[in-house]
Image (cartoon, rainbow, N blue to C red):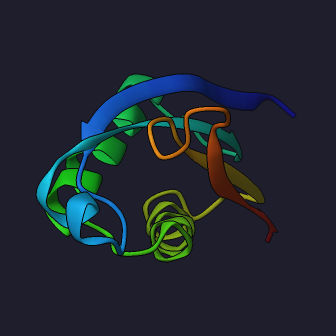
């Protein structure tokens, strides 16, 4: 089985709970992996990810991860593996922080 990879997708968006995170876009980095028995257009997936982030303005990284897991399972029903990591690049000066989800369907 082929794994479709998206690595180092970076853009600015509103995400977070703190007041400054709700008013100023911050840089995030996305890594994702998909395994499915159908074609997955990674360029389209990158576009979808950025558009959905900007539309939803997630409060918690965990909410975004659960959202995308459900979203892509519905969009690509034959997915049997999904992984996504969201890294907030500008929160700490000495570390990149974030969270990750991994689902086997």
Residue drawn where x is 20% and y is 45% of the image? 25
Residue placed farthest to the front in the image? 93
- Residue 94, percent from left and from top: 66, 32
Q: Quadrant location of residue 48? A: top left
Quarter that holds the C terminus: bottom right
Name the spot of residue 80 as percent of width and height, x first: 77, 59
On-image quarter of the N terminus: top right
* Res. 100 image quadrant: bottom right
**Residue 47 in view:** no
Q: Which residue is depicted at the point 43% across and 61% down? A: 75
Q: Position of residue 85 (x, y in %)?
A: 65, 48
- 31 lies left or right of 64: right
Camera-side residue: 96 or 55? 96
Give residue 33's quadrant in the image.
top right
Q: Nearer the viewer, residue 16 or 68?
A: 16
Looking at the picture, how far across and down is residue 49, in whole percent?
36, 46
Instruction: Give the left or right position of residue 48, taking residue 84 as reference.
Output: left
Report the side of 25 relative to 78 (left or right): left
Towards the viewer: 94 or 34 = 94
Identity of the residue drawn at 33% across and 71% down: 18
Is residue 53 positioned above or below 69 on the image? Answer: above
Q: Residue at x 45, y 74 (%)?
A: 60
For the image, the number of numbered tags is 0
Does residue 50 show up?
yes
Q: Is residue 32 above or below residue 21?
A: above
């Amino acid at each position: 089985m082929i794994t479709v990879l998206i690595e180092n997708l970076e853009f600015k968006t509103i995400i977070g709970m703190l007041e400054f995170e709700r008013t100023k876009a911050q840089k995030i980095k996305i890594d994702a992996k998909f395994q499915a028995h159908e074609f997955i257009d990674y360029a389209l997936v990158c576009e979808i990810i950025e558009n959905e982030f900007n539309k939803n303005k997630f409060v918690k990284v965990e909410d975004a991860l659960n959202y995308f897991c459900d979203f892509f399972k519905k969009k690509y029903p034959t997915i049997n593996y999904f992984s996504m990591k969201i890294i907030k690049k500008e929160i700490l000066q000495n570390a990149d922080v974030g969270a990750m989800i991994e689902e086997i369907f």
